[in-house]
Amino acid sequence: MAVDQQPEAAKRPIISMVGVAKAYGGAVALENLDLTVFAGEFFTLLGPSGSGKTTTLRLIAGFERPDSGQILLDGTDLAALPPFERPVNTVFQDYALFPHLTLIENVAYGLRARKMPKREAHALAQAALEQVRLGQFGTRKPAQLSGGQRQRVALARAMVNQPRVLLLDEPLGALDLKLRHQMQEELKRLQHESGITFIYVTHDQDEALSMSDRIAVFSQGRIEQVGTPFDLYERPNSAFVADFVGSSNLIGSAHDRLLRPEKIKLLPVPAALPDGHEGQTGVLHQATYLGALTRYIVRLADGTEVQAMEANILPLTDRLRLLPGDRVLAVWPRLAITPVQISTAANIDNQGEVE
Amino acid sequence: MRSNGAVLIWAAVIAILGFLFIPIVIIIAYAFSAAPIPAWPLVGFTTHWFADTWNDDEVREALLLSLEVAGLSTVVAVLLGTLAAMAVARMRSVGRELVSFVLVLPIALPGILTGMALASYFAFWSLNLSFWTIVAGHITFCTVIVYNNVIARLRRLPRSLSEASADLGGNAFLTFRRVMLPMMASAIGAGALLAFALSFDEVIVTTFTAGAQNTLPLWIFGAIRLGQKLPEVNVVVFAIILFTAIPVLLAQKLIGDSGRLGR
């Protein structure tokens, strides 16, 4: 199991899923899933749509029941508990704020459901709203808020209950890019301050890499790899992970050597191969200016097409450093090459357990 | 300048509206006519038919019965229709469409069929036709009205709302009281108003399920057949227009408001 790669024995598992399977009708959503999340972690479930990540979240919340397997929270089996008795809370993708209640009433809902007196519940709700910088909006209804504000109310409404685990289902999906980046920071801050374990579902690899302590990459109802952002990017164990987390070039005759685009340097020919590097000559096929970066596509002498990313360190004038049609020497440090298992998601299914 | 096409369309619109509403206007006008027999042209203006009608015990009894029937049918319909809608909204299987179809069937069936079927059913069990049989008949279609309104609302309500309530520790009862009921309230209200209006002026099913009693529409029917008390009929019709139009307008407003929910 990939989780065993974590050496620190001090970490205490808070959620353990053992052999969990779930199918809807005939369609398999999750296949024999094993997953351990440690207390205090920001843990991300990353994968394309339909890969089983949201199902995993809904199983922990209790909205779905597993066909087989166990889900433990702090060592206690959750199977017998309905959602309203589980010490976890969810931030829904569509926020699911109650439109007829004010923000204070929304945030106090969970406390009131647990029989906290109204005055006390509203005071805590007010404090939670202030923590997400919406303190002055307590008497408003959700319809009077912007998307980003609703998102923060949903967060406050879940966190005010001090859940053992906070489940977040693509919570930033509906926001524009700038707001997303702000909210990513805010989520990290809230997680850090509260010490609550976050389990975060997303299909956005940048979001996963920038926010997570560890990431589980899902594909077709299975976990492909679990690891830190660093592990997944630098040492992906399959071509699928290499390609889903970041962009990847697979080179070599067997296409089993991973070379990240930013590790390739393009030199105008003639040029000598620098020490510790390997390389190939090729023809520049495409050059795209992206602002901070320029993306090149090079057709190498052996016929492989590779993508190279170059930071635009010097100010560019009116033309790129290299233009399509130029002959180049593409070089990369030998150490930049990572061998990967060549296995598409489809034939992983036939291989049984992924190591 | 308007094109000929636009003029034609407006003419058609006015003609159709006239066709629909002129008879109603004439009846209302007759209610104020001094002549003892409704006839054109109107001779003189009077309001004494209103006093006569109000003091007519038959009319009073019929009005009271109609109000009681409509009121009770609506209450039962609200309960049954709402519960049925919540149950069907929860179903996931193919059974859902079937159950939905069976529930809506009473309103698709001709009233005469429902009426006859009920009459023979009551006869089979030797039940005397009474207030209760009228109410039973009205519940059949009133329930559908409430059901249709509520299920339409529930279909638009994201499932995440009730999940959020459960997630926050709300059991089924709390979720119903604090989330589902408020979300359904205006749909239930609109359904109830429409059901009330429908029950209040129902004739066909009532004909088969009423014994000696007269609801207001049945009294009108009888009076016209016998050619008696025709000025009072005009007054009663005027009253029925108000009794049914007001709930329908209110219901439309409620349904319109609901469009803003869930955002």
Image (tube, grey):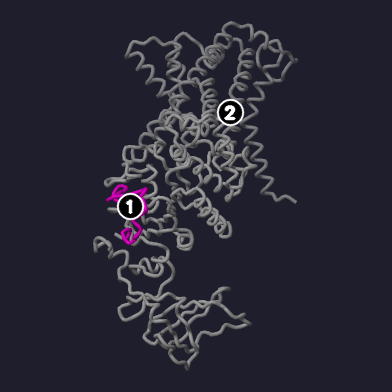
Crowding around mark 1 (Cα neighbors within 10 Å: few <14, some 14 to 19, many 20+) is many
What is the number of the mark on residue B144?
Answer: none
Q: Residue at x 42, y 79 (%)?
A: A306
Nearest the viewer among B190 and B198 is B190
Q: Chain of mark 2?
A: B
Q: Same subunit under labels 2 and 1?
A: no
Number of marks in the rendered image: 2
Q: In the image, what residue occupies the spot 56% across and 13% down? A: B63
Circle 2: is it few (<14), some (14-19), or many (20+) Cα within 10 Å? many
Name the front one of labels 2 and 1. Answer: 1
In the image, the segment drawn in magenta is A2-28
Q: Does the stretch in magenta take in A19?
A: yes
Quadrant of the image occupied by residue B30: top right
In the foreground, B137 or B150:
B150
Nearer to us in this view, B67 or A215: A215
Q: Which residue is mark 2?
A: B248
Residue B87, how many percent across, how many down? Answer: 39, 32
Label 2 secondary element: helix
In the rendered structure, find residue A29 and report the number of the disc placed on it.
1
The correct choice, above or below, for B234 with respect to A151 in the image is above
Q: Residue furthest front?
A: A10
- Three-letter amino acid code of the residue under disc 1: Ala
Q: Could you tell me if the residues under marks 2 and 1 are in contact, i.e. CB atoms within 8 Å?
A: no
Residue B18, compared with residue A31, is above or below; it is above
Q: Is residue B72 left or right of residue A346?
A: right
Residue type beneath disc 2:
Val
